[in-house]
Image (cartoon, rainbow, N blue to C red):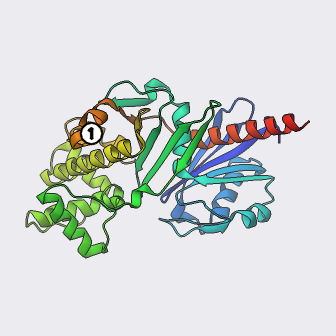
Amino acid sequence: MTLEGFAVVADIGGTNARFCRINLATFELDRIQVFACADYPTLSAVMEAYRDEQDVALEHVAIAIACPVESDDVDMTNHHWRFSIRGLRKAMGLKTFIVLNDFAAAAMSLVTLEPHEMKQIGGGKAKTHGPKAVVGAGTGLGVGHLITLPDGSVMPLPGEGGHVDWAPTNEKEWAVFRFMANRFGRVSAERVLSGPGLETLYLALADYHGRNVAPITAAQIGQRALAGIDTLAVETVNQFFASLGSFAGNLALTANTTGGVYIAGGVVPKLMGLMATSNFRARFEHKGRFCKVCEAIPCFVITAEHAGLRGVGQYLKQTLAQSEQRIADND
């Protein structure tokens, strides 16, 4: 396969499936379309819908998907789609079919970002070739890392960091922890730091205050908090950002992310109006003897549109370039 013509790339989350066409010569994206995952019984069905509605050929396809990709069998964490990579490639007659974890794609997107496509939240200057972490709250909580190799290429390191234990740090958080433990058994970071987590956090804080409230959606919590018309919603969002700061600081220490910690996902950009006044950065830096280390590491909120699609495209670009180089070396 040479770097010419077009391919189709997709970013598949637990709620939405984003597709676009990519020009293999210029790597420009067009024909972007978003589908609700719940409207389609299988991944192949939504791929066919994109093909038919956009009148594009499905020959070379690369997708990022919200679950581990460690074998031929892929089973989504927060949705019911399950498929065989080889089986789907054969069934749809694809010449190329690359499947990678969605936060491997999010990590790859970091090299495509321009300064105006991210907002820095504290810290110093990111080291260009330093390790980077990306964390994103949406339907779930995704985590990935990006390292630069000696030859200048980059390697994404996908993981399931969103499923580590959530660590309460004060009396209120212990109350939230007990509320969630009674509901779920184990309390992972994703139970707090996600859209569904925001909804449960709202109920947990109401319980902490001895209030009886009706469940509301994450979107409603965000709207009420931004408008300042619901003190419980404001407290919920502030608690979300405080816990996100602690979690992001842990990532910074784990991989010494001198290249920065990057916040992706659908939740945070919508709540940016409350992030600056929250304890996000204070909790990021509150690391005891290693406060100074975290104080130097910058955080960025990614504001670019379709960063996941760009990350898949970047991964495809690098994969194809490396493949062509191997072919040239063997000639």
Residue 331 seen in the current view: yes
Given residues 159 and 98, the one toward you in this image is 159
Indicate the position of residue 51 as horizontal and vertical percent values: 71, 52
Given residues 311 and 45, the one toward you in this image is 311
The residue at the point 46 percent across, 38 percent down is 132
In this rendering, the answer to whether 183 lies above or below 145 is below
Q: Which residue is mark 1?
A: 290
Helix, strand or loop at disc 1?
A: helix
For disc 1, the neighbor class at 10 Å (few under 14, some 14 to 19, many from 20) is few
Q: Quadrant of residue 109?
A: top right
Farthest-out residue, front: 289
Q: Name which residue type carries label 1.
A: Phe
Q: Quadrant of the N terminus?
A: top right
Total residue callouts: 1
Indicate the position of residue 314 as horizontal and vertical percent values: 63, 38
Farthest-out residue, left: 210
Q: Is residue 200 left or right of residue 55?
A: left
The residue at the point 61 percent across, 32 percent down is 150
Q: Quadrant of residue 216?
A: bottom left
Indicate the position of residue 328 as horizontal and vertical percent values: 86, 34
Q: Quadrant of the C terminus?
A: top right
Indicate the position of residue 63 as horizontal and vertical percent values: 63, 51
Q: Is residue 145 left or right of residue 73?
A: left
The residue at the point 30 percent across, 48 percent down is 244
The residue at the point 81 percent across, 53 percent down is 95
In this rendering, the answer to whether 146 lies above or below 237 is above
In this rendering, the answer to whether 279 lies above or below 61 is above
Given residues 230 and 245, the one toward you in this image is 245
Residue 217 seen in the current view: no
